[in-house]
Image: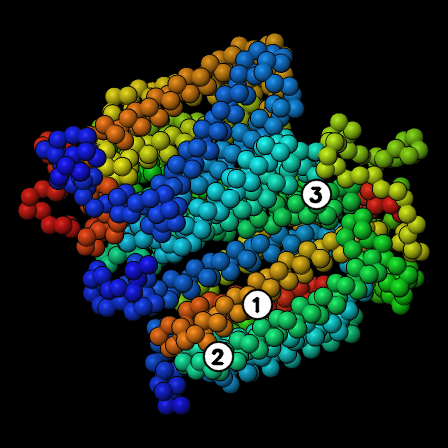
């Protein structure tokens, strides 16, 4: 155990050894949040349901990234890369959604001639 | 000694000190075909890539000449309309996915990037080799697609046509999917290499601008290409399984495909041009014997172009049914890209101002680049403006515009870079005078080919048409003749470069007098790149480099310190 | 190669695991990590396309998603979420024990992680198999059997479900689901002769091979008229979970490879990079599922 402690203190090669309680707490938080996201569907919050689901998922993802993926102790660049990719995802979704919603009235609802009814 | 004489084909007395042809170098470090095919040496992988992409360029060029010959006169000349559709599709797909995108980064970038950093290799040599093998796999699949039914969708694979045509779209698209991974791995490697393998003393703003160009390119390769991957995967799913996301007959939305496609493919345009801009920064400064003007502006404008490149994809969809709101936003954003591009051009001009300009072949290509890229860039503004785009979209004006940027920009810069680093890659000098003649032929031929297309397009000649009205005949005729002139230029280049491989004058370590690190090692470089890691200084400081007639290259002035 | 031989171009001796072009183990480790994060960014953007397809169709047709998600088994999805979270925990623990040089514990934790992957894929198989059996598939393969409809979306239920939403939402959904002729901004299609589709693929564009063949009309279960194009949901569902499933399989393979190397004794406190990088990959797979679960199973 002494050897382990020494290694933890030294944080070899500039990396951090995450303590077991931290990992366990993260898992516990993730499981609780999973239950919350499940439970929130019992209530009708209108459009807020989607936002609640996404917010909880975002929180869970943040926990995974920070503790399981070591981003909290890692070089900032790695976190920046993740954030940039998420930023591009939002940009992509944003423009595509704004566009399709705007030209939606010009489309024929339910038009799908190959689908036989 | 006899071995070196035989391999060199000249008397040893003529070999300058910086030449390593007879000594240990990366070319003779290992022998045999397998030592090439499974090499982990970035220089050899660069050469593998160079040979591969030039083969693809030849193939794409033959398709281009067939297209131009078909259009020499109205009506059918060589092929029927369906074959013509396949021809322009294959020309576009091969030139873009197999040649231009890997052209400068994967071939020349692979060779020079670690050398410019004073490093022994890229960060992940095995990934680098995998990238080339993926390229070969993708190329093989593309050729298979050509041989088994061809593809006639245009290189953009637009739905709904690509989901309904009977040609072998799936194989081609799968090939491009694989090529995408090849591109991602190259970009990933470059980013990590530039981050982690810079030598001591080389900060971000001491890097040669070529590296900034490659870095910005790599960012786009890594961040945009995956979206192309999923787009193509969805297209395959659409055809194979009828998944119904892009297919309007199944309730899908074909315009969404264009969003998906251009989210990658507009940034991809900058994958093609950014490394070219990096090359031009090197060429202009070196051959003006003058420090680059506005280093930080050029460096940051590369990053700015990479960032803006993600914000403008909708300008390919102005007439596709995209909503008016988004159209206006994209038009406005499109104009913003011209700012960093113009920053670069003005900085290059300011670098040349009062420089000692030397008109060697690479510099001639750099000057051609300035001229042609400016035309290409400015005509882009015509197309970015909504009102004029309605008139000009899908005409030869668009064809001419992107050829001025892609060919007049990227290919011209690629040729300049090829000549510039040829002595370093092969250890031989090419013949200067044929080089200048070939450059002139290509410049004249190119303008004849594509400037006429601007006029045709403005007069309303639609692109991708098999036939045309007689009133366009003079323009098509001139355009085709121009393409033949270009072809002559290319065969001339192939001739004297091949000749130089065997009979060229052995190159000194630094034939052009550049101060970046790749010129501090012998030509061709040894397997480990540098005997000892060089100290990095200002890559654009030429004060200590003087021409030595005996060597036929530049040497560091006696008594000058290794770094200023 | 000759990496093991210290060739004298570094100042310090090269350990076995250090590749020749790196100066220090730290440089190699941080390079690997940066490379992995870049690769993870490409993975995020690969999935971005599917998330975009999801968002676009959910944005314009919320009723499809509201209706179709009821065919998914929430408890199976939740179980899978828990399994994946736990396997992420064992993976993170495995990285820790590998950093501390506990070879036996690392191997056990990696094996547990693989077990989690197997559990996840087994449940996924059960779900897929059920949907295959009852015809809840994509595109033209969407033919839900009576068994599938049982207890799920009877048409009245659907209408009621939509009405539960707030006023504007319901109005929008209803408008989107209405037949063409009723919409105020729609082109007038009544002038067309009977049987002519308003926009259709021109005959010239249909090639001889690879063309989607005309299919005979089939009788569909009652209630299908209410919510149109439900197959789009299943197309997106199978694409998203399918691509994610492929990533789980790849991750299990990678963990198996790392497990083998751990047992061989390749890793220790000095060098555990592959364990760390494979761990990052596995966590990303988890991270994507964290979003897929509420987006596909828990629509309200």
Residue that numbered label 3 is attached to: B239
Q: Position of residue B19 (x, y in %)?
A: 18, 39
Gap between marks 1 and 3 measured at Cα: 30 Å
Question: What residue is shown at x 41% (from left), y 81% (from top)?
Answer: C100
Residue plotted at (22% across, 61% down): C7
Residue C48 position within the rendered picture, expressed as x and y whole percent measured from the top left: 60, 55
Q: Which residue is mark 1?
A: C252
Q: Secondary structure at mark 3?
A: helix
- Residue B109, above or below C124: above
Q: Residues within 10 Å of mark 2 (few under 14, many from 20)?
A: many
Q: Quadrant of the N terminus of chain B?
A: top left
Chain letter of mark 3 equals: B
Callouts 2 and 1 in the same chain: yes
Q: Which residue is mark 2?
A: C106
From the viewer's side, name the closer residue of B411 and C15. C15
Answer left or right for B298 relative to C87: left
Residues at marks 3 and 2, CA–CA distance in whole angstroms: 45 Å
**Pair 3/2: label in front:** 2
């Amino acid at each position: 155990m002494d050897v382990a402690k020494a290694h933890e203190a030294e944080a070899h090669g500039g990396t951090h050894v995450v303590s077991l309680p931290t990992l366990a707490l993260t898992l516990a938080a993730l499981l609780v949040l999973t239950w919350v996201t499940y439970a929130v569907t019992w209530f009708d919050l209108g459009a807020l349901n989607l936002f609640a689901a996404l917010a909880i998922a975002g929180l869970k993802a943040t926990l995974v990234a920070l503790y399981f993926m070591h981003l909290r102790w890692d070089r900032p660049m790695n976190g920046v890369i993740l954030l940039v990719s998420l930023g591009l995802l939002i940009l992509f979704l944003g423009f595509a959604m704004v566009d399709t919603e705007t030209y939606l009235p010009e489309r024929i609802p339910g038009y799908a001639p190959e689908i036989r009814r | 000694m006899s071995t070196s004489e035989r391999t060199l084909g000249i008397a040893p007395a003529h070999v300058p000190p910086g030449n390593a042809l007879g000594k240990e170098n990366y070319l003779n470090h290992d022998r045999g075909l397998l030592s090439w095919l499974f090499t982990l040496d970035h220089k050899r992988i660069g050469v593998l890539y160079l040979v591969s992409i030039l083969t693809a360029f030849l193939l794409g060029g033959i398709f281009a000449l067939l297209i131009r010959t078909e259009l020499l006169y109205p009506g059918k000349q060589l092929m029927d309309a369906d074959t013509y559709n396949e021809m322009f599709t294959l020309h576009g797909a091969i030139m873009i996915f197999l040649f231009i995108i890997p052209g400068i980064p994967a071939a020349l970038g692979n060779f020079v990037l670690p050398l410019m950093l004073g490093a022994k290799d890229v960060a992940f040599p095995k990934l680098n080799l995998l990238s080339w093998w993926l390229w070969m796999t993708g190329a093989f699949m593309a050729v298979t697609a050509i041989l088994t039914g061809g593809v006639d969708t245009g290189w953009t694979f637009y739905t709904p046509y690509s989901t309904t045509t009977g040609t072998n779209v799936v194989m081609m698209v799968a090939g491009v999917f694989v090529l995408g991974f090849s591109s991602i791995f190259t970009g990933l490697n470059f980013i990590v290499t530039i981050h982690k393998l810079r030598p001591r003393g080389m900060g971000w703003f001491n890097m040669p601008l070529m590296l900034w160009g490659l870095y910005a390119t790599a960012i786009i390769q890594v961040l945009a290409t995956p979206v192309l991957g999923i787009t193509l995967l969805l297209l395959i799913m659409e055809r194979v399984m009828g998944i119904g996301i892009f297919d309007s007959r199944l309730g899908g939305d074909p315009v969404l495909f264009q969003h998906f496609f251009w989210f990658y493919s507009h940034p991809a345009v900058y994958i093609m041009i950014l490394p070219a801009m990096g090359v031009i920064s090197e060429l202009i400064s070196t051959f003006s014997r003058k420090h680059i003007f506005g280093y930080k502006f050029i460096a940051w404008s590369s990053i700015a172009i990479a960032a803006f490149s993600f914000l403008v994809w909708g300008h390919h969809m102005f007439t596709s049914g995209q909503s008016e709101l988004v159209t206006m936003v994209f038009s406005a954003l499109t104009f913003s890209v011209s700012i960093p591009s113009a920053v670069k051009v003005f900085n290059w001009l300011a670098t040349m101002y009062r420089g000692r300009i030397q008109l060697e072949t690479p510099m001639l290509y750099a000057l051609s680049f300035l001229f042609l890229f400016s035309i290409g860039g400015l005509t882009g503004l015509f197309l970015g403006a909504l009102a004029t785009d309605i008139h000009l979209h899908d005409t030869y004006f668009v064809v001419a515009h992107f050829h001025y940027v892609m060919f007049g920009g990227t290919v011209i810069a690629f040729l300049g870079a090829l000549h510039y680093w040829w002595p370093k890659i092969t250890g031989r000098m090419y013949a200067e005078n044929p080089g200048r003649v070939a450059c002139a032929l290509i410049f004249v031929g190119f303008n004849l080919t594509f400037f006429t297309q601007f006029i045709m397009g403005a007069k309303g000649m639609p692109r991708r048409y098999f036939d045309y009205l007689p009133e366009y005949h003079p323009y098509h005729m001139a355009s085709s003749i121009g393409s033949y002139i270009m072809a002559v230029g290319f065969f001339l280049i192939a001739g004297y470069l091949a000749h130089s491989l065997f009979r060229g004058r052995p190159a000194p370590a630094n034939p052009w007098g550049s101060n970046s690190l790749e010129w501090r090692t012998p030509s061709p470089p040894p397997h480990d790149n540098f005997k000892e890691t060089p100290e990095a200084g200002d890559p654009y400081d030429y004060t200590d480099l003087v021409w030595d007639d005996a060597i036929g290259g530049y040497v560091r002035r006696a008594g000058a310190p290794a770094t200023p | 190669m000759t990496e093991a031989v210290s060739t004298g171009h570094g100042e310090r001796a090269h350990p076995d695991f250090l590749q020749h072009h790196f100066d220090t183990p730290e440089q190699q480790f941080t390079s690997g990590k940066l490379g992995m994060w870049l690769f993870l960014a490409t993975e995020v953007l690969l999935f971005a396309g599917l998330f975009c397809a999801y968002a676009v169709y959910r944005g314009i047709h919320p009723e499809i998603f509201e209706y179709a998600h009821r065919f998914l088994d929430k408890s199976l999805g939740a179980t899978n979420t828990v399994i994946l979270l736990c396997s992420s925990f064992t993976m993170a623990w495995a990285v820790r024990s590998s950093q501390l040089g506990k070879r036996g514990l690392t191997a056990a934790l990696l094996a547990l992680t693989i077990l989690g992957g197997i559990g996840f894929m087994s449940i996924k198989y059960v779900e897929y198999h059920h949907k295959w059996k009852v015809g809840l598939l994509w595109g033209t393969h969407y033919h839900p059997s009576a068994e599938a409809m049982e207890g799920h979306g009877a048409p009245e239920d659907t209408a009621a479900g939509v009405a539960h939403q707030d006023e504007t939402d319901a109005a929008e959904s209803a408008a989107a689901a209405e037949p063409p002729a009723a919409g105020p901004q729609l082109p007038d299609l009544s002038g067309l002769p009977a049987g002519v589709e308003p926009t259709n693929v021109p005959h010239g564009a249909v090639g001889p091979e690879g063309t989607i063949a005309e299919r005979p009309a089939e009788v569909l279960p009652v209630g299908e008229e209410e919510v149109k194009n439900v197959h789009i949901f299943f197309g997106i569902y199978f694409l998203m979970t399918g691509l994610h499933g492929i990533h789980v399989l790849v991750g299990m393979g990678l963990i198996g490879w790392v497990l083998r190397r751990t047992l061989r004794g390749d890793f220790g406190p000095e060098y555990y990079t592959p364990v760390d990088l494979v761990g990052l990959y596995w966590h990303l797979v988890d991270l994507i599922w964290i979003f897929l679960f509420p987006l596909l199973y828990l629509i309200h």
